[in-house]
Image: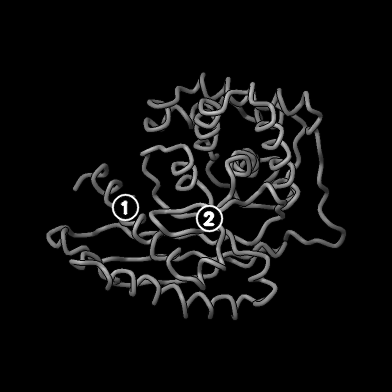
Amino acid sequence: MNQTDFDRWKSEALNHIFQALIVSEDINKTLIFKGARILNLILGDERQSLDIDSNLTVEFTQKFPDRESQKRFLDEHVNPAITRYFNRQEPVRYELKRIRIDPTKPHPLGWDAFTVSISLIDHEKAHVQGLPSLDVDIAAPEELNARSVMSMTFGTYPFRAYTLERIAGEKMRAFLSTLSAYRKKVKKPGEAVRVKDLHDLARILRAHPITKTTFWEEVGIQFKLACKSRFVDCQGLSTFQENWEFTRDTYEKDTRLRDTVPFPDAENALKTIVSFIEAKHIVPFTFPLEPGASTS
C-alpha cells in the first residue's frame, strides 16, 4: 500500500471507530465531536479525515474533575465500546489489536486533554504490514452557547457536534493559536502553522457566501467565544497575516490543499470573512490571561 492507500484505509477505519463511539450511550454523553470529519458530514463532502476530534463536555468534567477519574472512565468505556461494535459486524472485519489512552502533558492553564491511539487488525488486509495507528483527540471543554452545538446522525445513530458556525469560528481561532504572537503569550512550544484551517474556511465560504449575513455574524460570535476560551487575541486581518509569506509557503507545499483550493482563493476567503466580522465590530478583541495564571 502506498501513502494514498494508507490514508484511504485510515479514513474508512476511522468511520467505524467514530460509529463505535457514538453507539455507546456513555461515550455519547461525554464527547462533543468537531473538526474535519464533522465538517465533511455537514458539507456532504467525501474528503478524507485522518483523525477524530472531540471535546469533553462541561458536565463530564464537573462529575469527574480530576484527570485520574477522567482517564479511568475513558479506559472503562472506550475499549469495550469499540470491541462490542466490531463483534457485531457480519462478517467481522476489524479486531482491536491495541488501544492506549494517554493524558497529554498537563497544561498550565488547565486545558488538559487525552489522546486515544488505536491499532487494528483488518482481516481484509491480512497481507498488509504496518497498518497505521488511528487517533482520537479529546480536548478540554470550551465555552459554548446555544448556537455552538447541534444534534446530528451518522447512519441511524444520533450524536452531538459543533455547528458549522462554531467549526468555522474554531478554525479561525485554531489558526491564530499556531502563530508566534499567541505562542509567546502563553509560552506555547512551536508547532506547524495550521494552514489546513484556511483551506477549510474557503470550503465553508463556497457553501455559504458572505451574503448569508446571519450565518457569518454567528461565525463571528462563535469565533470570539472560542478565542475567549483560550485567551486568543485578534486585532483584525493583520493578526491573521503575521509572517504571511511563511504561511503561503507552508500552504503551497501541501499538494492536497493547493490542488483543491489554490492559495489565492484561501487568502481571498480569509480576507472576505475577516473584513465582514470587522465591519460588524466583532473584532478587535483582547483576552488577557487571568490574574495569577501561570503559563510556565
Q: Amino acid at mark 1?
A: Lys
Q: Position of residue 286 (x, y in %)?
A: 82, 41
**Is 185 left or right of 261, judged from the image as shown?**
right
Q: Is residue 41 above or below residue 237?
A: below
Q: Residues within 10 Å of mark 2 (few under 14, many from 20)?
A: many
Gap between marks 2 and 1, in whole Å? 18 Å
Instruction: Name the kind of residue labelled 2 in the image.
Output: Phe
Q: Is residue 179 visible?
A: no
* Residue drawn where x is 71% and y is 23% of the image: 275
Picture coordinates of residue 60 (x, y %)? 63, 71
Q: Secondary structure at mark 1?
A: helix
Q: Is residue 162 visible?
A: yes
* Quadrant location of the C terminus in the rendered image: bottom right
Labels 2, 1: front one:
2
Residue 10 tag number: 1
What is the image's colouring?
one colour
Left or right, residue 139 beside residue 289: left
Instruction: Give the SS element for disc 2.
Output: strand
Q: Which mark is residue 33?
A: 2
Q: Are marks 2 and 1 in contact (CB under 8 Å)?
A: no
Image point 55% across, 53% down: which residue? 151
Lower position in the chain sequence, tag 2 or tag 1: 1
Where is residue 211 shown, x and y percent of the image? 64, 21
The extreme left residue here reads 127
State whether residue 267 is above or below residue 19: above
Q: Which x, y percent locates residue 169?
A: 64, 40
The residue at 28%/65% (across/down) is 120
- Quarter assignment of residue 295: bottom right
In the image, taking residue 124 as reference, residue 246 lies left or right, namely: right
